[in-house]
Amino acid sequence: MEALQLFLQQLINGIQIGSVYALIAVGYTMVYGVLRFINFAHGDVYMLGAYFGLFAVTGLLANQTPLVQGLAGLLICMAACGAIGVLIERAAYRPIRKSGRLAALITAIGVSFLLSNGAQALFEARPRAYIISGIGDPFKLNFGALQLILDKGQLIILLAAIVLTLLLVYIVRFTTVGKAIRAVSFDREAASLMGINTDTVITLTFLIGSSLAGAAGLLSYGLTRNNFDPLLGVALGLKAFIAAVLGGIGNIAGAVLGGLLMGLAEAFVGGSELSPFRDAFAFLILISVLMFRPAGILGKNVVEKV
C-alpha cells in the first residue's frame, strides 16, 4: 500500500511539472512551426513571467482576495510576456529573417543572454519566492487505506494548464487567426500569395506563445512558493525544448505530450536513487529521441530540397 501511495504521489507531481513544461513547449513548437527556427529566448520570457507574477501578487494586487490575485495576476503575466514576445520578434528576429537560420540562432542566444542578464541587473541575483495566500494549504484525499496529500496549487496548475491548452487548440483549429497560422506554417510563400499578412501572423504566434510562457511563470511559482532567480529560464527553457522535441517539434499535441512525459520522468527519477542525475536524464531523453525517432513521437519526417 505504501508503494502504491508513493507511486500515485509521484504521478501527481509529475503531471503538475509536466503541465508547466507543456505550456512552455507549446511556445517553442509554435514559433518553429511558423519560422522553422528555435527561439532560445523563450525560456527567459517564462522567467520574466515569474517576476511579473511576483510584482503583481505582492504589490499591485496585495490587498485583493486570492481569487482576484490569481486571475488578475495571470492576465497581467500573460499580457506583459505577450508584449515582450512581440517586441523580441519585431526588434530582434524580423530584421534578420532573411539572413538564414544560423543568424536567427545566434540572435536567439543573444536575446536570451540579454534578458537573463538584464533581469539580474533589474531584480538582483538573489532567489525570490512568493505564493498566493491560501493556495499552499495541504489537504488529504482518503481512499480507504490509501491517503494522498495534495495542495490547492497542484490542482490549480493542472486545471489552468488544461484550460489554456484547450483555448489554444480552439484558436488554432476553429478561428480565422488559427487558420492563418496553420497556412503560414504549411507554406509561408503560398499563404502570402493568398492574401495572408505573414508578418502579422508571425507576430501573433510570438504573442500567443509568450503569453503561455508568462502564464507558466505565475503557475510555477505563485502557486508553489518555489525559489526562482534570473537564470532559471536557461535550465527550464532547455527542458521545455527537449519536451517539444520529444513530442514532435512543430506539433502542438506533441508539445503537450512531450511536456507531460518529461514531467513524469523527472518526478519518478527525482524520487529514486538516481535523483542527483535528474537533469542529466532529460538530456539522455533528447539524445535517445534524436537517435531513434528524430521527428519525435507525433512528428513527421519531412524531406527538404537542398
Image (cartoon, grey):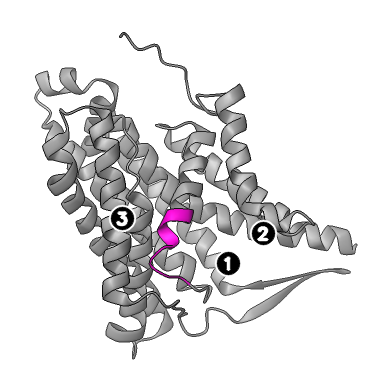
Q: Does dot 1 land on a helix, a strand or a loop? A: helix
Determine whether, in the image, residue 198 is placed left or right of residue 234. left
Residue placed under numbered mark 3 in the picture: 113
Q: Can residue 301 be found in the magenta stretch?
A: no
Instruction: Tell me if I can see residue 200 in this picture.
Output: no
Query: In the image shown, does 57 or 232 lie closer to the viewer?
Result: 232
Q: Of discs 2 and 3, which sits in the foreground?
A: 3
| Residue type indicated by callout 3 | Phe
Mark 3: few/some/many CA within 10 Å (<14, 14-19, 20+): some
| Residue type indicated by callout 2 | Ile
Q: Position of residue 126 (x, y in %)?
A: 42, 78
Residue placed under numbered mark 1 in the picture: 154
Q: Quadrant of residue 144?
A: bottom right
Q: Does dot 3 land on a helix, a strand or a loop? A: helix
Q: Position of residue 65 (x, y in %)?
A: 39, 85
Counting residues from the start of the chain, the first of labels 1 and 3 encountered is 3
Q: Position of residue 263 (x, y in %)?
A: 60, 51
Counting residues from the start of the chain, the first of labels 2 and 3 encountered is 2
Do the residues bearing badges 2 and 1 touch, measured as CB atoms within 8 Å? yes
Give the CA distance from mark 1 to mark 3.
31 Å
Query: In the image shown, does 62 or 241 lie closer to the viewer?
Result: 241
Give the CA distance from mark 2 to mark 3.
34 Å
Q: Quadrant of residue 293?
A: top right
